[in-house]
Amino acid sequence: MKKKEIIRLSATKIIAKEGFCKTKVQAIADDAEVGVGTIYLYFKNKDGILDYIFEAQHKKMVAFSEDIEKRDMPPIEKIKKLLEFHFKELENDPNLAKVLAQEGSGTPKNKTKWMKYDSIGIPAIFHKMLDESKKKEEIGNIDTEIFAAVIFFIGRETAYLLQIKGMRDKQYNTFQELVTFIINGIKKHD
Amino acid sequence: MKKKEIIRLSATKIIAKEGFCKTKVQAIADDAEVGVGTIYLYFKNKDGILDYIFEAQHKKMVAFSEDIEKRDMPPIEKIKKLLEFHFKELENDPNLAKVLAQEGSGTPKNKTKWMKYDSIGIPAIFHKMLDESKKKEEIGNIDTEIFAAVIFFIGRETAYLLQIKGMRDKQYNTFQELVTFIINGIKKHD
Amino acid sequence: MKKKEIIRLSATKIIAKEGFCKTKVQAIADDAEVGVGTIYLYFKNKDGILDYIFEAQHKKMVAFSEDIEKRDMPPIEKIKKLLEFHFKELENDPNLAKVLAQEGSGTPKNKTKWMKYDSIGIPAIFHKMLDESKKKEEIGNIDTEIFAAVIFFIGRETAYLLQIKGMRDKQYNTFQELVTFIINGIKKHD
Amino acid sequence: MKKKEIIRLSATKIIAKEGFCKTKVQAIADDAEVGVGTIYLYFKNKDGILDYIFEAQHKKMVAFSEDIEKRDMPPIEKIKKLLEFHFKELENDPNLAKVLAQEGSGTPKNKTKWMKYDSIGIPAIFHKMLDESKKKEEIGNIDTEIFAAVIFFIGRETAYLLQIKGMRDKQYNTFQELVTFIINGIKKHD
DNA sequence: AATGAATGAGGATTCATTCAT
DNA sequence: TATGAATGAATCCTCATTCAT
């Protein structure tokens, strides 16, 4: 694997455990089995590492959503598919889920470029889908912007919670339940 | 007001803006208009300040939930009441919402006593209520432990989001919609 | 003495011995018998210390030249007086002389505020005096701007040389000879 | 041209602009269009590059002085000739002038072999000539050792000043004036 | 001979904490 | 109680130097 990716994975692991602020660049270097200096060959500074973690994940999500957009299905099904992908990703890489949840929740001011873009970009995808779905009267009269963000964070938090609480065995069910919960929560009720 | 409370409020304000790690004790002292040394009269260390913020809020929540428990009403109504209180609190003090959401999401290892207790204690209350509600078949067959935590965090996250996105005007509606969303999401569907 | 002055003196001593680049802030702190942190209470950064050394000396020189300007004497006498003061200063504090000579000779780009002002300001004083003297035909038709700078540096270099070469005993004579040398060098010769 | 010479010229250029301490070996490599590693084929370390710059110039000066020594002319004329050569060299390569002036002024302790030798060797030549001249009573009763060094540095400093102040057009005259200044300064006055 | 990716010792700076007043 | 000047451990980042290719 490329050195940059090795560093990204080690950083994700350490930051998940310690939190970004408490993570020492040296610790990442040690885990990645490279010298500290090497990290600075691939990243401008410590923030740059976190930024890259967000960038990598963000690009994956966007690629998937673009793919889904092309397909012909009811908007609410698209939302379901995206939710499933979103959750599946976080389920597969719990460290990543932790980092995205923990470090993505700062004030915009303190966010790096991709952190900002991530917490705007992904919810924006959900937002667009929710609007479509609302137009077709599949879902009730909710504030789609806020709900898009809420849905986005529910996934991250849950992946993180399962991890924290050592409930990895519960994961499959939980994510399915969560998708149902969200779909039920937003569907039009008479 | 007591000095300790003045410091807590200043700390909440600054930490909300900067994040705990980047917050300098000096900045809190400046905002509270006391000397740095004074802070150390009331708090053992920097972590102690954050701990106290969680402690204060946690105690409020517990007091309310104990009050509600005594009353006679269907469990799902209790959940609704607690949710409304939870949201109302965060709505009234957006800085507090930010701090609780941002700093509450660390690894247990890095959490101070009350931070841990807060994210165990409050969800535990929801958990108990959800279990009762499940027994009475008001809600579907969900993993109540996880959902308790999810619901707890949805509140924090949303209060925080509204604040960040500068949508304070949307607040009243959003919180109502959110209560509906959650209640619908968990209710038994045929 | 004020802490800031103690630090300035220690810095002058160490920088004279090691050169600015090789001087460690810790070494200055050790010599001044203060903590490293203390230095940063009084100076913005390492450069700030050097800057202050130049500032302090510059102000002394300007004060003396303003004093001399008020007096009534032939311009060439004023030059002589200023030269003598200039040399005397450097003679009394050889470490200072070294620092001013060594670190004052960088590219403007690398100079701090007062370093720049010093190597412009002091020669400017000589320049003005030389122009006056030239008008009165005391001195020959030389490029006064360049000579002002040359005279300025001769002093610094010489003080420095005497120090380096361990010829402190020669000092008194040398500086007198140097004044004569310069005065003879610039005087009108038939 | 030989690689070593290409590197020497690039180093002279960069060091003149940045100062030795702030010059990065990589920057020299870039300017010389060679790899960093290549530099270490020709020079033991960074100091070695500076040393070589002094060595090259020193050897030129010594060659000329040896040539002049053989000729039959009054000592003061020899001094004049050497001064002219000294100035002409620095005039032709302003970057070199800067480097010699800036980096030649360190404490002996920090000087590399040739840096030391340069500021001992060249002044020694002047010293010898001044002594001869003094014996023939061409010049006054000055401390010839100190004046030799002073004269040596005046040249470097002036070449450097003209460069810094962007007065390249003034050069020819200035150097002539300077020779006159020095000769007048040291000549016997009745 | 030539390269440049990799290294890690070293140094500037920060900031939580203390303690004399 | 209240203060803030002083401290120094801790940490990011740089850059001279090496060495496998």
Image (spheres, coloured by chain):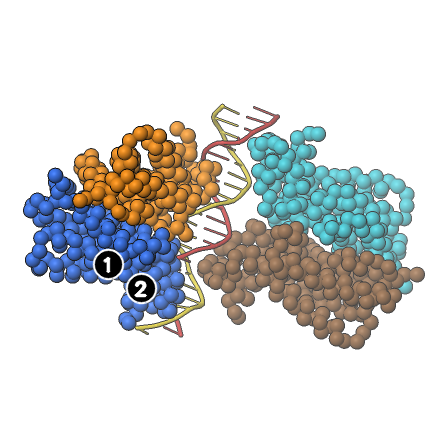
Chain colours: A orange, B blue, C brown, D cyan, E red, F yellow
Q: Residue at horizontal 87%, vertical 51%? A: D76
Q: What residue lies at 52% left-to-right and 61% top-to-bottom?
A: C43
Residue pointed to by mark 1: B88
First-in-chain label (1 vs 2): 2
* Residue kind at label 1, given as amino acid type: Lys
- Residue B134 position, x and y percent, is 10, 45
B104 sits to left or right of C187: left
Chain ID of residue with mark 1 = B
> How many labels, in total?
2
Amino acid, disc 2:
Leu
Q: Specify the quadrant of the image occupied by residue A100.
A: top left
| Secondary element type, mark 2 | helix
Q: Residues within 10 Å of mark 2 (few under 14, many from 20)?
A: some
Res A84 seen here:
no
Q: Quadrant of residue D140?
A: bottom right
- Across and down, in percent, residue D90 comes to 76, 45
Q: Which residue is mark 2?
A: B9
Residue A28 % position (x, y): 37, 40
